[in-house]
Amino acid sequence: MIQLEGVTKAYRYRGIPKYIARDVSVTIPQGGKLALIGRNGAGKSTLMSMIAGNLNPDRGRITVTEGISWPIGLTGTIQGDLTGIQNVRFLGRVYGVDTDELVDFVGSFADLGINYAEPVRTYSSGMRGRLAFGMAMGIRFDTYLIDEVTAAGDAAFRKKSNRLFEDRLAHAGLIFISHSESQMRERCTSAAVLEAGKITFFDDIDAGLAQHRRNMQLHRP
């Protein structure tokens, strides 16, 4: 369960507060497949970072009673001066899993060859993507937080990645940020629409997407 109680978060722009969340109180049940929807700049990634514990709300409390991932897809997970193996070992220690098993899993999955033992700053963007996705899938979470992540690599690797992701989601929940309506429909059954610091929940993903389109029409220049 993920519970937000009176959560408020705002940034100031030219002295005026811009609210990401304004006295939000909601409960997200474990195992749900939830699309987090909103206009660009609405604060979706900020809200997800607060749920992950990477940011604190200005007021209120967020309680998490399950194992959740970091926001997969956001920058900052991988340290460029460390090798791929060192990054994986560090992550394994943070999450309390067997580091040798995780190193073996990511090495086999990401298919980085000798580059696995080289500093990540020498990697191509595709190699970094394969490493990051392998790290995320190598740890089993109760809920995965996905922020616009896309599988890197060639068609065969993307197929392998999607197959593994589907296997993980068969036994876990999901909070998903994407600009693709088709991906949201494919991955999610419910929606939370973020607009002007308020969240509206929909049990049906199509109803949430319809509300988002109405919000976009109202704010069209």
Image (tube, rainbow, N blue to C red):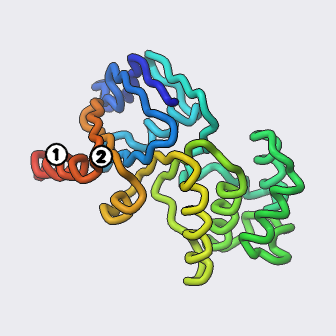
Amino acid type, mark 2: Gly
- Foreground residue among 220 and 175: 175
Question: Which residue is pictured at 66% across the width and 57% down the height?
Answer: 137
Quarter-of-image position of residue 70: top right
Q: Which residue is mark 1?
A: 215
Could you say whether the residue bearing mark 2 is in a helix, strand or loop?
Answer: strand
Question: Which residue is pictured at 85% across the width and 56% down the height?
Answer: 101
Q: Which residue is mark 2?
A: 38
Q: Answer yes or no: do the residues labelled 1 and 2 have beta carbons within 8 Å? A: yes
Question: Which residue is pictured at 60% across the width and 56% down the height?
Answer: 168
**Disc 1 versus disc 2: distance between alpha carbons?**
9 Å
Number of residues whose C-alpha sits closer than 10 Å to that of mark 1, classed few (under 14), some (14–19) or many (20 or more)? some
Q: Please state the horizontal and vertical placement of residue 193, each as a whole percent of the image.
A: 28, 41
Q: Earlier in the sequence, mark 1 or mark 2?
A: 2
Question: Which residue is pictured at 73% across the width and 58% down the height?
Answer: 80
Residue closest to the far right: 100
